[in-house]
Image (cartoon, rainbow, N blue to C red):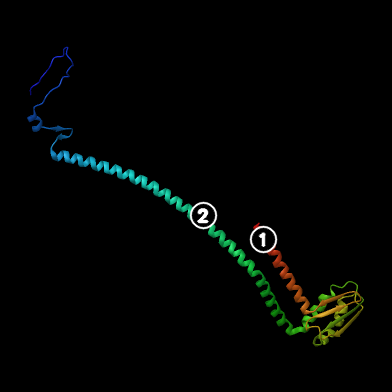
């Protein structure tokens, strides 16, 4: 191998030391970091570097894609949760509206059922009239003379009960039992000098109906206040 050395000295510019290698030696033994730089080696190295860059790009893209996908997923989940909450609130509201619309029908249905039960119970109206009269007399206070009007079909049954009634209600000194065709079987009307107690079946049923309707209206108003 030949070497050329040029001395440093004054001149327009200084030349750095360099060493020249014969072309034939470079061609014969072109060394790289990992061995001879053959075309195959250069191709392998280029391919490896390309694969490394591609892997890095893929990893970076995958990471970015995962992050973007996660963000989009969370956003969709959030929207879905809000939609579910709105749907649940709407279902609750619709249920309340539905129940409120049913309240009058429920009351009327309850009254219809009660009326049918009462009619079935009136099949033995003699026992019913006994109970009706006793409940009516319980509301009297120190009534000396009392007149009880019942349906003609109940007259005999109540006359048979007269002695027991006088014994049960000591404040009553005189008890008159009379027939009145306008009084339905099972009911009665009690009169004193100052008080009339309508214990007819129709009146009792009407009071029950009024109470049920009042309860339904009260429940509806309380529900409205809670909503506000």
Residue sticking out furthest to the top: 10
Q: Nearer the viewer, residue 182 or 18?
A: 18
Q: Is residue 61 left or right of residue 4?
A: right
Q: Position of residue 111 (x, y in %)?
A: 70, 75
Q: Check disc 1 and report the residue beneath it.
A: 224
Q: Position of residue 28 (x, y in %)?
A: 8, 32
Q: Position of residue 73 (x, y in %)?
A: 43, 51
Occupied quadrant, residue 176: bottom right
Image position of 26 with respect to 53: above or below = above
Q: Is residue 64 left or right of residue 45?
A: right
Q: Is residue 179 left or right of residue 211?
A: right
Q: Secondary structure at mark 2?
A: helix
Distance from Cα at disc 1 to Cα at disc 2? 26 Å
Name the image quarter holding the C terminus.
Answer: bottom right
Q: Secondary structure at mark 1?
A: helix
Q: Position of residue 202 (x, y in %)?
A: 77, 79
Occupied quadrant, residue 31: top left
Q: Which mark is residue 59?
A: none
Name the image quarter holding the N terminus.
Answer: top left
Image position of 194 with respect to 63: above or below = below
Occupied quadrant, residue 21: top left
Residue at 36%, 45% in the rendered image: 64
Residue at 67%, 71% in the rendered image: 104
Residue at 69%, 62% in the rendered image: 221
Q: Check disc 2 and report the residue beneath it.
A: 82
Image position of 209 with respect to 42: above or below = below
Q: Nearer the viewer, residue 86 or 169?
A: 86
Residue at 83%, 86% in the rendered image: 155
- Mark 2 burial class by Cα count in 10 Å: few <14, some 14-19, many 20+: few
Task: Indicate which disc, 1 or 2, sits on the residue closer to the N terminus.
Answer: 2
- Mark 1 burial class by Cα count in 10 Å: few <14, some 14-19, many 20+: few
């Amino acid at each position: 191998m030949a070497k050329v050395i040029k001395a440093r000295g004054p001149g327009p510019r200084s030349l750095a030391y360099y060493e020249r290698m014969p072309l034939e030696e470079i061609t014969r033994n072109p060394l790289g970091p990992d061995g001879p730089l053959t075309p195959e080696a250069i191709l392998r190295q280029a391919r490896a570097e390309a694969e490394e860059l591609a892997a890095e790009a893929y990893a970076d893209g995958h990471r970015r894609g995962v992050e973007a996908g996660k963000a989009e997923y969370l956003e969709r989940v959030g929207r879905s949760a809000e939609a579910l909450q709105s749907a649940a609130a709407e279902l609750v509201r619709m249920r309340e509206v539905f129940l409120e619309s049913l309240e009058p029908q429920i009351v009327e249905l309850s009254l219809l059922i009660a009326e049918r039960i009462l009619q079935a119970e009136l099949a033995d109206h003699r026992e019913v009239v006994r109970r009706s009269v006793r409940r009516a007399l319980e509301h009297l206070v120190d009534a000396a003379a009392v007149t009880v009007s019942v349906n003609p079909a109940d007259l005999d049954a109540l006359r048979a009960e007269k002695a027991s009634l006088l014994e049960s209600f000591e404040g009553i000194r005189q008890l008159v039992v009379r027939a009145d065709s306008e009084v339905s079987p099972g009911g009665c009307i009690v009169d004193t000098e100052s008080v009339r107690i309508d214990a007819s079946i129709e009146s009792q049923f009407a009071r029950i109906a009024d109470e049920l309707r009042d309860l339904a209206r009260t429940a509806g108003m309380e529900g409205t206040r809670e909503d506000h």
